[in-house]
Amino acid sequence: MAIAIQPFDAVLDHATPNDFVYFDPPYHPISATSNFTAYSRYSFDSTDQKRLRDVFGQLAKRGVNVMLSNSDCPFIRDLYQGFNIHTISASRAINSNAQKRGKITEVLVTSG
């Protein structure tokens, strides 16, 4: 097993039935102030989110066990309808507004 830096869709060249793949992409913004998605010089926008959903679906059809975490928002819930969507609670300790720190909901999407 090796770790490599590759585009997320490169997993399609390697994953086989019963493998487990977890995606932790830049979360889709849920507000105007939470739109930081540029972890590198390349941003991760709604088009990328849709491409990731397509890869997720292809892997699931192959029998790969797939899981993904993301924002709990209508856009993500709509993208992954038909898959198992689980609401989880997560803590956030970083926010410029101390009143907005604390528990938020996120989603975990699973293929099975």
Image (cartoon, rainbow, N blue to C red):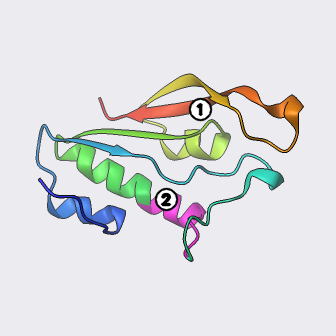
Query: Badge 2, how many Cα within 10 Å: few under 14, some, many 20+?
Result: some
On screen, residue 40 versus residue 67, left or right, reads: right
Magenta part of the protein: which range? 42-51
- Does residue 83 appear in this view? no
On screen, residue 4 versus residue 13, left or right, reads: right
Looking at the image, the residue that sits furthest to the bottom is 41
Let me know if residue 80 is in the magenta part: no
- Find residue 96 and report its image quarter: top right
Per the model, the C-alpha gap separating discs 1 and 2 is: 18 Å
x, y (%) of residue 74? 66, 40
Reading the image, the residue beneath label 2 is: 50
Vertical relation: 33 (above or below) 82: below
Residue at disc 1, secondary structure: strand
On screen, residue 53 versus residue 87, left or right, reads: left
Query: Badge 1, how many Cα within 10 Å: few under 14, some, many 20+?
Result: some
Foreground residue among 81 and 71: 71
Reading the image, the residue beneath label 1 is: 106
x, y (%) of residue 97? 88, 39
Vertical relation: 55 (above or below) 65: below
Q: Amino acid at mark 2?
A: Lys
Which numbered disc flags the more N-terminal residue, 1 or 2? 2
- Find residue 9 and report its image quarter: bottom left
